């Protein structure tokens, strides 16, 4: 979907009678992204797991899961409660991506296991294994555990320079084998999978316009990191199998690292989520290409001076390190900029229009993309689905279903 003023006028007319703010998904772009990911998976003979935190809308997740390619299998979930919600809706094959030790979460996971669902729970410490084992004994189930290994890049060989996410403390073959051996001493927990998520590659743009030198440096770091982490991941997977562990899957990557992750022979599946919406932070990758598909619209309610409009609401800031890239991205009309001292506000967002911009009237929409993908759905009860330039359906987000899972 190109960002043009002509496209703006088409969308403005389409949503003329709709209440603002609203959120919508362009199904033509969404389906193109789905097809693209499926083609990559087929090329490498792998499958794709749906990253639920990046979609947070069950009808769209089911649209992907039932893709004709059969490339998509199972869910990478983010909380125990969300996992149970999906299980209750008839779904199966879950990888709970983040550890938990809360007693109520343990009860929920035991319920999912008793339902006969395939479920692997993330672990990276003896404490995680112990809690799962004790819960398994109490509820007469055996939990499957997924061992998460740290994929961050440390070019100096120590923690003085750490490029990547602060996730698992398990980094080496020896640490992974030690945890597997501890699991073998427990009666109600069994390691059945491995995950190594290279977030610093999957989430870092390296083909940003007008940033040539920075792009080159980032690609160099990414390539060096891919070589290091791929070798280390392969060694850990081999060592774990050498301990007699039969692995159901080895999961890696995300939307931005799909090519390099799928090319790793030790990986059996990758995760896809943000790339399907192609939110603001997923526009500029050299190796993967997605079409922006998820948007929200705010109403123009003031014109404080020539060349400026003010929209109602808009303070939908993305999580992570506080920086300008976490602001919603105004995309249409083309060329709008934030007022530096206000940014995206809780109840109003002023915007500076470029010279020669399309004329905006009170009540007109301004279209944005959230910086991240699924967080948009925490702000809206429904997504309007658009296909072929027409509104074809409205579907509920997790919030619209009455849930805030985290």
Image: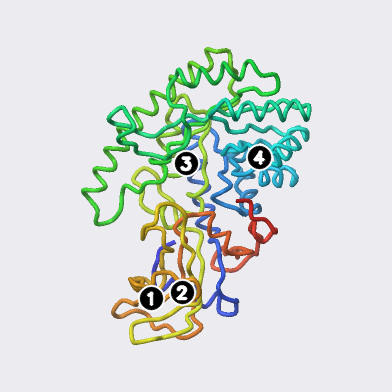
Q: Position of residue 33 (x, y in %)?
A: 49, 50
Q: Which mark is residue 351?
A: 1
Secondary structure found at label 2: strand
Q: Which residue is tagged 2?
A: 366
Residue at mark 3 to residue at mark 2: CA–CA distance: 30 Å
Q: Nearer the viewer, mark 3 or mark 4?
A: 4
Pointer 4 local density, CA inside 10 Å: few below 14, some 14–19, many at least 20: few
Q: Position of residue 389 (x, y in %)?
A: 54, 68
Proximity of marks 3 and 2: CB atoms separated by less than 8 Å: no
The quadrant holding residue 125 is top right
Give the mark nearest the N terminus, 3 or 2.
3
Give the mark nearest the N terminus, 4 or 2.
4
Which quarter of the rendered picture does the N terminus lie within?
A: bottom left
* Residue at the image position 65 percent from the left and 64 percent from the top: 394
Nearer to me, 169 or 366: 169
The quadrant holding residue 390 is bottom right
Q: Position of residue 247 (x, y in %)?
A: 58, 22
Residue at mark 4 to residue at mark 2: CA–CA distance: 43 Å
Say if residue 336 shows up in the picture: no
Q: Which residue is tagged 3?
A: 254
* Residue at the image position 75 percent from the left and 25 percent from the top: 137
Give the mark nearest the N terminus, 2 or 1.
1
Give the mark nearest the N terminus, 3 or 1.
3
Pointer 1 local density, CA inside 10 Å: few below 14, some 14–19, many at least 20: many
Pointer 3 local density, CA inside 10 Å: few below 14, some 14–19, many at least 20: many
Give the mark nearest the N terminus, 4 or 1.
4
Q: Nearer the viewer, mark 2 or mark 1?
A: 1
* Residue at the image position 55 percent from the left and 73 percent from the top: 21
Residue at mark 3 to residue at mark 4: CA–CA distance: 27 Å
* Residue at the image position 56 percent from the left and 66 percent from the top: 23
Q: Which residue is tagged 4?
A: 102
């Amino acid at each position: 979907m190109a960002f043009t003023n002509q496209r703006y006028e088409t969308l403005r007319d389409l949503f003329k009678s709709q209440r603002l703010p609203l959120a919508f998904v362009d199904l033509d772009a969404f389906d193109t992204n789905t097809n693209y990911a499926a083609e990559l998976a087929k090329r490498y003979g792998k499958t794709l797991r749906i990253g639920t935190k990046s979609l947070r809308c069950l009808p769209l997740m089911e649209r992907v899961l039932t893709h004709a390619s059969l490339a998509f299998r199972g869910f990478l979930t983010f909380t125990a409660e969300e996992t149970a919600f999906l299980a209750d809706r008839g779904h199966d094959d879950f990888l709970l991506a983040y550890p938990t030790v809360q007693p109520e979460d343990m009860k929920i996971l035991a319920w999912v296991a008793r339902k006969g669902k395939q479920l692997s729970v993330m672990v990276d410490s003896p404490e995680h294994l112990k809690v799962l084992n004790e819960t398994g004994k109490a509820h007469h189930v055996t939990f499957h555990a997924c061992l998460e290994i740290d994929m961050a890049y440390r070019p100096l060989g120590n923690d003085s320079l750490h490029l990547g996410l602060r996730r698992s403390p398990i980094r080496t073959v020896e640490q992974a084998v030690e945890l597997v051996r501890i699991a073998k001493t427990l009666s109600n927990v069994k390691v059945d999978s491995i995950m190594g998520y290279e977030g610093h590659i999957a989430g870092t743009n390296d083909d940003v316009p007008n940033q040539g030198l920075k792009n080159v440096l980032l690609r160099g770091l990414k390539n060096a990191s891919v070589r290091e982490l791929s070798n280390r991941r392969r060694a850990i997977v081999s060592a774990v199998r050498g301990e007699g562990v039969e692995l159901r899957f080895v999961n890696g990557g995300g939307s931005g690292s799909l090519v390099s992750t799928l090319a790793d022979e030790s990986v059996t599946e990758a995760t896809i989520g943000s790339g399907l919406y192609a939110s603001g932070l997923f526009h500029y990758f050299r190796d993967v290409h997605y079409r922006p598909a998820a948007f929200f619209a705010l109403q123009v309610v003031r014109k404080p001076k020539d060349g400026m409009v003010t929209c109602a609401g808009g303070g939908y800031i993305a999580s992570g390190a506080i920086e300008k890239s976490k602001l919603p991205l105004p995309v249409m009309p083309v060329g709008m900029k934030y007022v530096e001292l206000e940014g995206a506000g809780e109840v109003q967002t002023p915007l500076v229009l470029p010279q020669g911009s399309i004329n905006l009237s009170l009540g007109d929409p301004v279209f944005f993309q959230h910086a991240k993908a699924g967080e948009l759905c925490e702000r809206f009860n429904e997504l309007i689905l658009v296909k072929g330039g027409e509104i074809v359906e409205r579907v509920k987000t997790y919030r619209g279903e009455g849930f805030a899972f985290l």
